[in-house]
Every structure is written in C-alpha cells, then in structure tokens.
Image: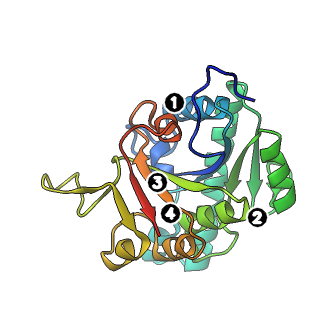
Amino acid sequence: MPDSDTPRTTFRRVMLKISGEALMGDTAYGLHPPTVERIAREVKVVHDMGVEICMVIGGGNIFRGLSGSAQGMERTTADYMGMLATVMNALAMQSALEELGVFCRVISAIRMDEVAEPYIRRRAVRHLEKKRVCIFAAGTGNPYFTTDTAATLRANEMACEAILKGTKVDGVYDKDPMTNADAVRYDRISYDDVLAKHLQVMDASAIALARDNNLPIIVFSLDEPGGFRGILAGEGTYTTVHA
C-alpha cells in the first residue's frame, strides 16, 4: 500500500500501451537498453504509488507484420512473426523492471511455457491484486489484429479504468505536429471524432472497442520525464479520448 506521503492517484488500475519503437531510443533498430531502463523507472514510480499496472508493448522495433506483408510475405505468417517480436520486448521490459525490484509477469497469448505464462484471465487478475506488473505479449494471439486492439481487449478483461497510450507527442493533434507547425492539440476528443477525422490515436477496431465499453484513452508523451506519473497524479499535458 502507498504511504501517506505518496500522491493520490486518479486511477487504481491502468493499461500502459507503448510502441516497440519507443524502446529503440536513438537507434534505428532493436532495443536500446538505457531507454528500456528509463521507461521501467517510470513504471516503477507509478507502481510505488499503489497503481496496478498492465502493459502491452508493440513489436515494430524488431518486426512489423504489416510491413512484412507489404514486401510479399504471406500476411498471417508476417503477423505471427510480429507477435514473437512483442514477446522479446516484453521479456526485456520484465528484466528491466525486476532489476528495479518490481515483480512482473509476462503473459503470452501464444503458448510458450518456457519463457512466459499462458493467458488465463483469472490468474492475470490475481497477479495484479498481488501488485505484480502484467505485461501482455503476442497480441491477441490472432493475425490481422494490432497490439492496439490487444491492449484495449486486455484492458477491458482486466477491468482497467483507462488506457494510457505513451507516444512521442503530448497528445492528439489535428495533424502531424512533427511536420506541421500549425497543428492544434485537443485536450479532449470523442471516440467518434477520432474515427471520423481519421486521427492516428489507435486503429479503428481498438477505438470502437474502447467506445463500446466506455474505456477512456489518455494519450501522452513517453519522452517527457515523469509523464506517466504526472497523468496518474492529475498533472501534465495530455489528450483524453472519451465518450
């Protein structure tokens, strides 16, 4: 339990969704250990606040199924390769968290019992109740579904109160802020507006699943030090996607 000096938090249980590219740091491919450690420290700070944390990490830093398919590979095979990449990232994050003294479980939608637990909902909930961080890997276990959809699905199954999407920008903009100086950031925006305006928050199936279950999505910058903690303390700059 958090002590009396720990800030009060907005949520009790959350899903943190980050891309595989977030683990690359300044490198062009793969994992950048100092970046993985920095994100792990951010997670530990929030964990120490008493928040129960689920995580889903993409695999785009190693292999992206859609790009593999675009190069002529059969889509189902490419997607399964992408799922295996997410397991590698999950294991790296687990190692970094455990180095910081945070108990953690990697839970895979594809059975690989020697390296990760199989996904069993009740067991995963029990891990969270015991204050272990649960990293859900291998997507949904099915091709044609992104890790965005997997994060939204697991967040609903785990009764998370919000999805926190860590990106390179501090919210949702009407256009790409990296290439458009006049881009405008939304403080709040509805699920339907995200879909209608084709804003790149999550893929359409993930947004629709969140909307149907009234699960808010909070988009914030993972590159801002203390950004994850700030959201949970009701501080910082971010965009909320809501009903």
Seen from the viewer's position, the closer of residues 2 and 96 is 2
Q: Secondary structure at mark 3?
A: strand
Among the two numbered marks 1 and 4 on one chain, the one whose residue lies closer to the N terminus:
1
Which residue is disc 1 drawn over? 38
Going from the N terminus, do you reach mark 3 or mark 4 first? 4
Mark 1–mark 2 Cα distance, whole angstroms, equals: 28 Å
Residue, disc 3 = 218
- Residue at image position (64%, 31%) is 49
Which one is in front in this view, the residue at disc 3 or the one at disc 4? 3
Which residue was labeled with disc 2? 110
Point out the tag, 1 or 3, that comes first from the N-terminus: 1
Query: N-terminal of the two: label 3 or label 2?
Result: 2
User: Residue 113, percent across and down?
Assistant: 86, 54
Q: Amino acid at mark 2?
A: Ile
Horizontal relation, residue 238 to residue 16: left or right: left
User: Which kind of residue does numbered mark 4 sit on?
Assistant: Arg
- Amino acid of disc 1: Arg
**In front of the other: label 1 or label 3?**
3
Q: Which mark is residue 64?
A: 4
